[in-house]
Amino acid sequence: MRIYCPKCKVGYEIDETLIPEEGKKLRCSYCREVFVAHREDLIATPVLVMSAGNATDSAKNAENEDISESGEETAASEKTEAENEEIKEIFQRLAEQSENLVKEELEMPAYKKFFLKMRSGLGLNRKGNRRLFAFVAAVLALLLLYNYRYEVVRSFPFMNHVYNLVGIKAKIPGEGLEFQNITWNPIEEGGDTKLEVKGFIYNPTDREIEIPVMRVEMLDKDAQLLQSLNQKPLLKSLQPGGRVAVGVVIKRPVPEAKYIYMTFID
């Protein structure tokens, strides 16, 4: 007997004795559809017969080779029966495989079922789609690693070397350090007016931090840059809770300066 998948209409040969009265769950090996097969859904398989042309040719060959007609028919019948048995065994194995698949699906954990449904919904059962999805995922991962590079380095300091290998700066200079008690006073020296900026650099963190180059900027009342000066620190790094005094002398300061801004640069 033959059963057809209700979704893709692919037919399978199956022994009707394998189908109980209440029906049996089967899975189509082509479209993966699970359906319940009943005995009344089975269709009789057409009997294989020889064509008229083949019968005539067989009769002629029998005459030429002096083979009796009854012997030829017996051989053809045995061959047909062997083919039917082979086909029956094939579809019986398919039925057993479908039964095993249904059993595995019933015993499958909920999270795995959800994963398989999502995979099918995204079309990842196809190799080409999986490659495209992997490429898009890799691009998104690289974009995230770039956009959140500072957060990544804060959590995993060793990643700073990885970013440096590809020429990406992922560490804010002097991050964690603080300027404290910054004062600035004009002084006269040899007839020239100078501006002395003094204060402290403090490390409030629990780790040693490298002290980068300091930058002092003089701004006007509208916070526009008028003058700047870079200076290397006296110490290379600052221990946790450490403090170091800094002093910068700006020669010939711009009279319009109203604000002093200090920061760190590479």
Image (cartoon, grey):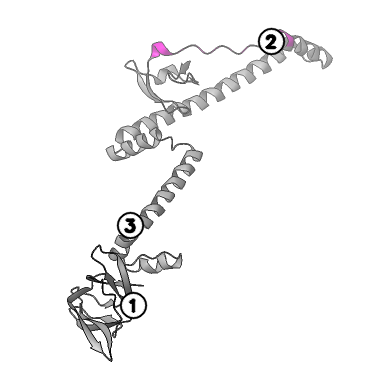
Check residue 48 for magenta coloring. yes
Callout 2 secondary element: loop
In primary-sequence order, the first of circles 2 and 3 is 2
> Which numbered disc covers residue 51?
2
Please tell me whether mark 1 or mark 3 is closer to you in this view: 1
Q: Are marks 2 and 3 in contact (CB under 8 Å)?
A: no
Specify few, some or many for label 2: CA neighbours under 10 Å numbering under 14, 14-19, or 20 or more. few
Q: Which residue is mark 1?
A: 230
Q: Which residue is mark 3?
A: 148
In primary-sequence order, the first of circles 2 and 1 is 2
> Which numbered disc covers residue 172?
none
Residue at 33 percent across and 57 percent down: it is 148
Q: Is residue 54 above or below residue 239?
A: above
Specify few, some or many for label 3: CA neighbours under 10 Å numbering under 14, 14-19, or 20 or more. few
Where does residue 151 sit, x and y in percent of width and height? 29, 60
Residue at 22 percent across and 70 percent down: it is 258
Which is nearer the eye, 109 or 128? Answer: 128
Please tell me whether mark 2 or mark 1 is closer to you in this view: 1
Q: Is residue 220 above or below residue 92?
A: below
Magenta range is: 39-53
- Quarter of the image with the C terminus is bottom left
